[in-house]
Image (spheres, grey):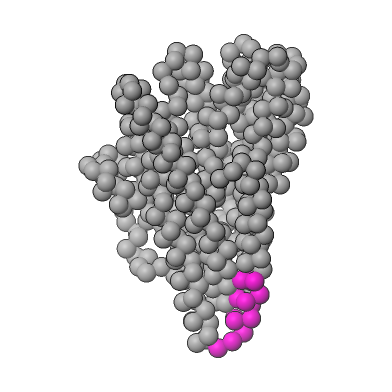
């Protein structure tokens, strides 16, 4: 996709989704007043529209995760400086990911966002519920066949294989470099396919909203408003935590950094696109005193491994779906889910609605129906705006912290552009 076309396509898709949302609400309210036969027919049509979209999303998950995760790990290379800087910042990324997931998990348990929603129909909900056995889970994460794991879209097994494959690339010499180039190209193709699939998102939004409201009536609209308020409140808590932790490293200069990040944050929130913010974020970090060689390394890495807002949504959204279907997750299951999401959320930056794709991939691992994601699609753009701004904030902080750790953070604009 051409660099200049993405914001336009994103805006068009956003408008289409918003129009589909409004039409779905109006259609659902009207159909709800009609006979039960008409309502049943509308629900069947909604199931078809959302089902096609979900199947297409699931179709691209396995090659997409493999390609992007392998290429992301392979790009780290074997240079000692890369490992030193990359190792430190990856530890920071992992820590922030863990904190973000825990905040989403805690908020999901406190707010109970799924309470009151009418669940979309699934073929056999009882078959999704299964006991959680730690030993079986640990054995399950190691695939006996990666082809079998991909055919079943077993995201955790795919992640384990992809991580090992990516780590083995530097040791393979020329063959490793060739394979790295191949996975990068495969990743580009799968991203394009995902973008094509997302063209059907308005259809899925219309079907999901229309079917739900046709069945439940206008009360569903109140539930959506409550969900948005609860999610934004949770995001605000994460912003406070991230800023506090950055202050512990940067000290009083955090105020200057926040001042520089205001414009990128607004742009990220307005466009819901991290990619559109990248050049501006580089410029603002340079104004703050972060050498370009640091920000130019940390930001691309962060766009793959440090999506704080997106992964907070993973745990919050999973609990939402569990509550919609009245599926109880034990404390052990929830903690294990956090660990799985920590792995599965890495390496797919740039995917349209990446949070939706990864959440769909993880849900079956814990007996949660993917159909529940259709309840979120209608308002996901507003969720994505907050997620994107949070991702920008987290990566801006990470670049400044990395420069501070390396002792190269200056008091003003830096001349280092290499």
The quarter of the displayed image where residue 249 is located? top right
Count of labels shown? 0
Residue 24 inside the magenta-drawn segment = yes
Residue 30 position within the rendered picture, expressed as x and y whole percent measured from the top left = 64, 81
Which range is magenta?
23-35
Classify 4 as above or below 414. Answer: below
Furthest-left residue in view?
A: 144
The residue at the point 51 percent across, 35 percent down is: 304
Residue 39 position within the rendered picture, expressed as x and y whole percent measured from the top left = 53, 82
In the visual, does 194 lie left or right of 144? right
Residue 139 position within the rendered picture, expressed as x and y whole percent measured from the top left = 25, 41
Q: Could you say which is closer to the camera, residue 347 or residue 2?
A: 2
Q: Could you say which is closer to the camera, residue 391 or residue 313?
A: 391
The quarter of the displayed image where residue 48 is located? bottom left
Residue 334 inside the magenta-drawn segment = no
Q: Could you say which is closer to the camera, residue 109 or residue 279?
A: 279
Asked if residue 400 can be seen in this view, the reply is yes
């Amino acid at each position: 996709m051409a660099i200049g076309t993405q914001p336009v396509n994103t805006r068009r898709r956003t408008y289409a989704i918003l129009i589909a949302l409004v039409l779905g609400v109006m259609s659902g309210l009207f159909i709800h007043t009609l006979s039960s036969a008409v309502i049943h027919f509308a629900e069947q049509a909604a199931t078809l529209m959302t089902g096609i979209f979900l199947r297409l999303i699931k179709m691209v998950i396995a090659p997409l995760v493999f390609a992007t995760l392998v290429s992301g790990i392979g790009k780290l290379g074997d240079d000692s400086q890369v490992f030193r800087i990359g190792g430190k910042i990856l530890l920071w990324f992992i820590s922030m990911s863990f904190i973000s997931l825990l905040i989403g998990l805690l908020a999901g348990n406190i707010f109970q966002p799924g309470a009151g929603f009418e669940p979309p129909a699934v073929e056999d909900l009882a078959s999704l519920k299964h006991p959680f056995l730690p030993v079986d889970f640990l054995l399950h994460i190691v695939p006996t066949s990666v082809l079998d794991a991909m055919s079943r879209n077993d995201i955790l097994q795919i992640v384990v294989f992809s991580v090992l494959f990516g780590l083995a690339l530097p040791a393979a010499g020329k063959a490793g470099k060739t394979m790295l180039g191949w996975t990068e190209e495969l990743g580009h193709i799968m991203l394009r396919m995902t973008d094509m699939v997302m063209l059907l998102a308005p259809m899925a939004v219309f079907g999901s909203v229309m079917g739900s409201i046709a069945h439940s009536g206008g009360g569903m609209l109140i539930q959506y408003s409550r969900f948005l308020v609860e999610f934004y409140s949770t995001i605000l808590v994460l912003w406070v935590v991230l800023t506090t932790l950055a202050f512990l490293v940067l000290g009083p200069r955090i105020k200057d950094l926040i001042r520089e990040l205001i414009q990128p944050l607004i742009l990220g929130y307005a466009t819901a696109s991290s990619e559109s913010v990248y050049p501006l974020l580089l410029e603002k970090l340079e104004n703050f005193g972060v050498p370009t060689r640091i920000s130019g390394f940390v930001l691309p890495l962060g766009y793959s491994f440090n999506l704080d807002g997106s992964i907070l949504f993973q745990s919050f959204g999973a609990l939402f779906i569990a509550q919609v279907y009245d599926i109880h997750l034990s404390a052990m299951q929830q903690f294990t889910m956090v660990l799985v999401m920590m792995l599965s959320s890495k390496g797919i930056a740039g995917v349209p609605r990446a949070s939706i794709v990864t959440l769909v991939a993880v849900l079956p691992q814990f007996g949660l129906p993917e159909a529940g994601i259709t309840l979120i699609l209608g308002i996901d753009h507003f969720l994505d705006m907050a997620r994107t701004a949070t991702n920008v904030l987290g990566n801006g902080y990470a670049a400044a912290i990395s420069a501070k750790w390396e002792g190269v953070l200056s008091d003003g604009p830096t001349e280092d552009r290499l």
